[in-house]
Amino acid sequence: MAYQGSKGWYVQQLKRVGITKHPVEHKKLELYKTFVVRNLYLKNVVNK
């Protein structure tokens, strides 16, 4: 289990809603830094 707010937690939450790759570059989420994954989470999960 990942700590809330960590990169692993953000990746876990994005995968839960079906996002497994970056929408533009089509690479795995695990390859990106925390701030990129966090921004994807905020755009796609929180603002949904």
Image (cartoon, grey):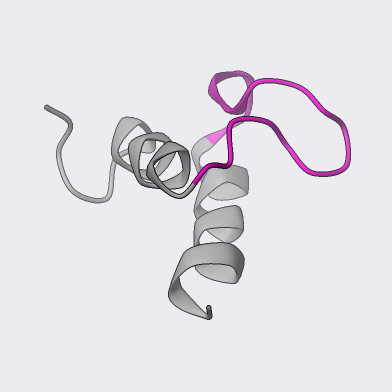
22 or 7: nearer the eye?
Answer: 22
Seen in the picture, residue 2 relative to 36 is either above or below; the reply is: above
Is residue 42 found left or right of 26 in the rendered image? left
Is residue 5 found left or right of 39 in the rendered image? left
7 or 28: nearer the eye?
Answer: 28
Which of the 4 image quadrants contains residue 40? bottom right
**Most distant residue in the front direction:** 18
Q: What secondary structure characterizes most of the magenta part?
A: loop
Q: Residue at x 55, y 48 (%)?
A: 35
Which of the 4 image quadrants contains residue 33? top right
Q: Residue at x 53, y 42 (%)?
A: 18
Whether the magenta-drawn stretch holds residue 13 is answered as: no
**Most distant residue in the right direction:** 24
Residue 21: give x, y in percent of width and height: 68, 31
Q: Residue at x 58, y 64 (%)?
A: 44
Quadrant containing the N terminus is top left
Residue 42: give x, y in percent of width and height: 51, 67
Whether the magenta-drawn stretch holds residue 26 is answered as: yes
Residue 29: give x, y in percent of width and height: 59, 28
Residue 24: give x, y in percent of width and height: 88, 42
Is residue 3 found left or right of 25 in the rendered image? left
Q: How many marks?
A: 0
Magenta-tinted stretch: 18-33
Q: Residue at x 38, y 43 (%)?
A: 16
